[in-house]
Image: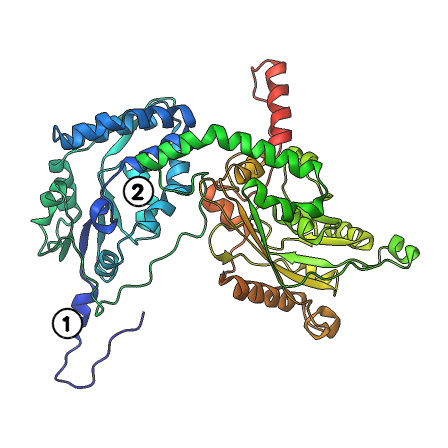
Amino acid sequence: MTMPTTSSAAAPASPPRARRSRSVVAELEGALLRSADTFPYFMLVAFEASGLPRFVLLLALWPLLRLLELGAGRRDLALRAAAFVATVGVPRADVEAVSRAVLPKFMADDVDPAAWASFGSCEGKRVVVTRMPRVMVERFAKEHLGAHAVVGCDLEYSRLRRSTGLLKGAGHDAVATRVRALFAGDDRPDLGIGASEMASSFLTFCQEQLRPPFTADHDTNAPPFRPVIFHDGRLVCRPTPFMSLVILFWLPLGVLVAFVRIAVGLMVPIWTIPYIAPVFGGAVIIHGRAPPPVRVSDDAAAAAGSPSGVLFVCTHRTLMDPVVLATVLGRRVAAVTYSISRLSEILSPIPTVRLTRDRGVDAARMRAELARGDVAVCPEGTTCREPFLLRFSKLFAELSDSIVPVAMNYRVGLFHPTTARGWKAMDPIFFFMNPRPVYEVTFLNQLPAEATCAAGKSPVDVANYVQRILAATLGFECTTLTRKDKYTVLAGNDGSVNAKPPAAGKPAWQSRVKEVLGFLLH
């Protein structure tokens, strides 16, 4: 951020400094976020941490919770009941994982730009006050809102590190006391932002009060809001009561539709899929012209490992990318993958080549496949849902000069077809469970010889160039983030899949069943 300057002695520098160092206390629900409703966030915790039964139970209790909020004026009791149903018995690690990987995306989508302009322009102490448990808000507030502290109630946990569903530290008086304690020894907060009765408990402590509706202040120096690039979870839409009902009513039909779509896709010739997809509610949109197949005239050269096929370099949106590419091309395309479940390999209609992350071994395997024909590679190494491209690995640029960039993208309405924490084998099923799954494939021109390593370009330059032209085609943004960054944020690891020894004390048959399921689904 640029520092303001003055042009004469008549305009001293102290006022701008005072403005930049202003402290702020802001309510999250209904102020920084447009919606004051906390119910969808508890529904997300219920669905992602426990599954469908708890999701259904919490939805069934919604009329009672709403009656408590509006009819009886017991919003605090309704909040406690929602928190209890959503979290009781859930391991602490699961609650924290959902709060880290799922909730920030939905909160970021609901941020009020005008409220953020006022909050973000304050460069002193920033405090966010929330009615929800702090664990559900802290990651988003500190990493995306730039908050220094979060004031809210806390979930209680048992000795077994499972949530009891009970809240401690809730109540207006407790909130006001903790806000005052954060500013002990300092001046009162310069700005207070809030709308609810709870906000009134700390707004009177602030020198200036701001209540909705907010108006954008174009004179503020608020930094750009930090977007959420990595997020997890299966639900696309915010699970409001209405959308939750839609999801529940669609689920049985969606499972049936997915089964039919997958069965038909495995039975018909692969080149017919783009033509019959609209009959089953899907669509494959093609832009550009696909290159013709390369004829292998010298069998000896092919056997020796000389590249003869086209290397298709794709953006990585879902596990379906190489399959969709093969259906559009209507010919054999081998897909190289880093981590794909055995079940997905079994069901895949195209050949798959599992890589090892050992550059020498992986390069040899890819050269061997290129000698047999076309190969599809996703240099990002992992999927990204948002309009960003991760850093491209340079390995593909070292293997072939026949490089065709392909911009892949998809649109779904209810379920995300990717996951970092869940069962990856379910990704294609969730894709086909959407009412209208759409894939968009854009073929770019083959890289000219002067843009490849054959002309003396370094592999890094070639990889960066391909990343830039694919990002420009899709309207995405290039990043230097990697697979490791994604899994660090979403799963707390580096994305490596390691075999775990069976737990001591478990019967052999249980360990064997768990081993088989892990082998097939992960």
Residue type at mark 2: give it. Val
- The residue furthest front is 279
Q: Is residue 145 visible?
A: yes
Label 2 CA crowd tier, 10 Å (few <14, some 14–19, many 20+): many
Identify the residue under disc 1: 15
Identify the residue under disc 2: 137
Residue type at mark 1: give it. Pro
In this view, the residue in front, 293 or 78, is 293
Residue located 31% across and 34% down the image: 241
Decide if residue 98 is on the left or right side of residue 363: left
Residue 26 place in picture, x, y as percent: 19, 50
> Distance between the Cα atoms at labels 2 and 1?
33 Å
Residue located 75% across and 71% down the image: 454
Give the label on residue 153, or none: none
2 or 1: mark nearer the eye: 2
Residue located 12% across and 28% down the image: 72
Label 1 CA crowd tier, 10 Å (few <14, some 14–19, many 20+): few
Residue located 35% across and 41% down the image: 238
Residue 386 place in picture, x, y as percent: 46, 53
Q: Is residue 501 visible?
A: no
Local SS, label 2: helix
Residue 102 place in picture, x, y as percent: 40, 41
